[in-house]
Amino acid sequence: MNSQELALLLTDSSLDASRSRNASQASPPLQRGSPLASEHEAAGLEPRGDKRVENSDNDCRYDGRRSDGRRSDNDICSDASSDGISDIIHDNDSEVRGRWGSDTGVGLRGADELPGDLSQGHSRQHLLSSLDDEALIQLVNSYEPRPKPERRLADADEGSPSVSPVDFENVSDVSDNDRAPEDARHEVIDCPQTPPQAPPQAHPDGPLAFGDYETYFKHKHVQQQQQDQRLRQIHGVKPPIFKNCIIYVNGRTNPDRLVLHKNVVLYGGVFNHYLSGKTSVTHIIASNLTSKKRIEFQKYKVVTPDWIVDSIAAGERLPWQRYALITANPNQPTISTTLDCKSPQFLASFFAKSRLHHLSTWKADLRAKFCSKYVGDVSIERLPKTTRLAIFHIDFDCFFATVSALADGRYSLEKQPLAVAHGVASSEIASCNYAARAFGVRNGMWVRSAKRLCPDLVLLPYNFNQYEVKSSILYETLVACGAFNMILPISVDEAICVRFSDEALSDEAIRNDCSKIVSSLRERIFESTQGCSVSIGCGSSLVLARLALKRAKPGGFCIQLSRDSKSVESFVSSFKLNELPGVGYSIVDKIKTNFLRKNVSSPTVADLKQNSTRQALISKLGSKTGAKLALFMEGKDDEESLKILKDPVEFFTRKSMSVDINYAIRFDTIHEIDTFIDRICDHLTQKMKELGLITPQVTLKILRRCAHAPIEPEKYLGSGECDAFSRNSRFGVPTDEMGVIATEVKSSLRMLSCPPKDLRGVAVQFNKLMKASDRDKQRKGLFVGVGNPAKGSLNTLAYHALPKDFRSDIKAELSKRNISVPETPPPKKAVTISPVKDFWARHWKQDPPPKLEFPSSLDNEFMVHLPSQIQRELKQDHAILKKTKRTMRKSVLSKEYKQFEKVINRNFLSEPIKFQALDRPKEILSLVQSWIDDSINSGPHSADLILFDKYLTKLSDAGKTHFILRMMNLMSSRLEYHSSYPNSAAGRQEWEEYMLRRIVPLLNQSCHNRGTALNFTFDV
């Protein structure tokens, strides 16, 4: 049998096989009278005998021919032509077309299409085994796969029966042809005979090429617009609220994307499923955006889904600005990039974004202004005893959050949880409203932690300009009120006001008067600030006013002016201990340990009163803290708290000035730190000169990364877990010179010995500030009358030694100036001394010069008060003088005595060989190990190797070969340990080279010197 005969046999057999297999796999013919046959008859169809079809790939295939007598595209056939015989081999999931060359004219089907029993495996093998080698090889080699025709979306729209419009209102309209292909592959159905259809026409643009995404999305966009048009026809005409709006939805929203899509389309808008360009949409709907998306969409109109919902509910398109998601204030500097601390602009950038810097600056300016303008010489010490005080403690309610929310204008302070912060994860919350505090959110908490407690928390940006404006309005309103004798600024949002009353007035009269003032003041502040509320506490002492303020918050007032001690104690006893001013966690913990026997989670003042006395508090907590706490429980102020009322000018005077930075501090070298310290000192000295101040003392504080802490903490560029160190330095004379101060700070830094890469925080503080004018007064008063004669006095001897003519002119001039002329001194009697007395007086009876006693040591108490630089100079001079006082004889005798004493007291036979002042082998080995570990990346220093080489030479000369061998083993093991780290390759190679070239020869030489014929080799 040749190949031509085999091809004809396979072709004829395959047709019979396909018919027989379809007939065997099909269901039995429909019997007349059955339910399914009845349905066909009702539809005007005849029951079909064996005309069954297996639906594969969503195509209905009949047993051979269509109703019009033509073969369908999916018929299993083979047509002989000039190009050969072509077949379609159907698999379960794919379709493969094959073409055989014209030289053979042979077409080969898959195993499923073989005729009769040849579809079975053993029959197919039997047939192929009957071919000779040449025919089988020719049959296989002549096969050529035909490429699968490319299809287009447009072709599918026009000719594919599987794509049809779907009526979402009537799901029953979905035909069987619209089912998923997975369902269709395993279901045998009856296909009704349909009228003949013309074959699909090819798209005029040609088939869709691979990778032609532009055409693909163009066709997809056309289909989506057709679906939107169909949706409008189904639901009818709606008001065109979103006319001329092209809207895109980004991410997860509420309502979801499908609902927004439907609403936008029905109300006249265009819905885009993807962004094809920056100008392709007019609005973007999003509930939340990442940092990168905020930057990418900052030029778009990004709104929340509420804009769609509220606009439909209102029947008109609402302003999108109310629903803007990106709320960056153009007046506030945004954090685009983090400046490196090595940059000259780092300090200015840090201060511009630092909330604490703004607060401290505003507070200092307010205090300076009010002390000179509204306080003056007023003090409670100068008041008559019949004067009664009413102290008002005024504080804004969640100041930052309120002002930022009012500036934004989209949020409700009472209903929505709001917070002010810089970032979105590890930033600290500066302020939050009471709606957020109800979820447990607190000031100083990380945003990430706050979001876990309150997922709907809204973060607002800082608005420093508005903070300053609202703060100024507060103090202007307090001054305009005219009801207070003293106005003491505590902070930008907090003030203490004092009103003097007559002692003769009753408690009720004073209370009514204060109530009117408080009510009027709260209304005026609310109106002038356009929505910022204040809480006011009023009491007869500072502590009572503070506690009354806690009782008044939020948005209220409380007055406690009773002179009844029982009423005051009852009022104070209702508060918790940690609500008293100056009482924190550590003091409460001591109180629990020493006074409260039972386990009380939140002890109150009443609990402490029942279990303690004044003496017990002083004994357990200290004299200062115990006495203060005892006074607070009685509603009285201690002396330290009263300083603000007794001498407010002195209390508000600057005592110190500092710069403290513990964010983004990352240095590599000590020189970079020196440059940074120069910038800090320059900033502080300029500020100090503007205020006319000088400082006699400077303090350096640093934060050093803990040994177990990670190099980069959880908070980006934060300090992480650190150890704090500080050092004070005094100047001999108070100064404001930048160079002198910076030099002292750098010296303190080196004494603290912090590696540059472990530095995480730097703070420079000027202490004990004083006015520069006071220093000038002190300088003028120094050495008065010393070395200079008083005005109007003349040297009598010099005056009378002048020539007579010149002396007369001088006398006349002195008379004109009312300067007294010295009288002529009386002549001295001549004294004659004998030559003998004169000789002995000159040669033998001269007084010896005073002998200066050299101190053996310096006075430490005196040295502490000197500047550091002078201390070092004095110590160096003292050491030099001490050496010059020692004679050579004393030093030789002392050295011999010490050597003799050393030999007598030593516990070893031979003199030990020291290395870096160490003589014990274990200590030296530990030092060498640390040396290798520290220099493994960069290699050992040449100077260090020279010292180490000298030490090894001494060991060799002393015959200590065993110790050299021990040292060699240690070094080899450490280098082997570091070989697992790739970054240590360069340094490790230098160490290995030194060992091979120097230590190994030295070890062998030491062995030969001792008569040992050994040679050492090391595998390093």
Image (spheres, helix red, strand yellow):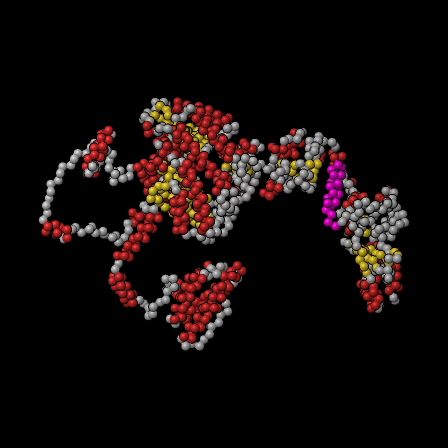
Outermost residue, front side: 805
Which residue is more in the foreground, 48 or 95?
95
**Total of numbered circles in the picture?**
0
Q: Is residue 76 left or right of residue 866?
A: right
Residue 389 occupies quadrant: top left
Q: Is residue 234 above or below residue 740?
A: above
Asked if residue 221 can be seen in this view, the reply is yes
Residue 518 part of the magenta segment: no
Residue 217 part of the magenta segment: yes
The location of residue 970, given as percent across then percent down, is: 45, 66
Which residue is more in the foreground, 591 or 659?
659
Outermost residue, right side: 69
Q: Is residue 893 left or right of residue 959?
A: left
Give the quarter of the figure containing the N terminus.
Answer: bottom right
The location of residue 76, given as percent across then percent down, is: 85, 54
Residue 773 occupies quadrant: top left
The location of residue 403, given as percent across then percent down, is: 52, 32
Residue at x-position 49% and y-position 66%: 993
The location of residue 924, given as percent across then percent down, is: 40, 64
Which residue is more in the foreground, 643 or 58?
643
Asked if residue 264 can be seen in this view, the reply is no
Residue at x-position 50% and y-position 33%: 467
For the stretch drawn in magenta, the main secondary structure is helix
Residue at x-position 52% and y-position 44%: 339
Residue at x-position 64% and y-position 41%: 250
Q: Which residues are magenta?
A: 210-230
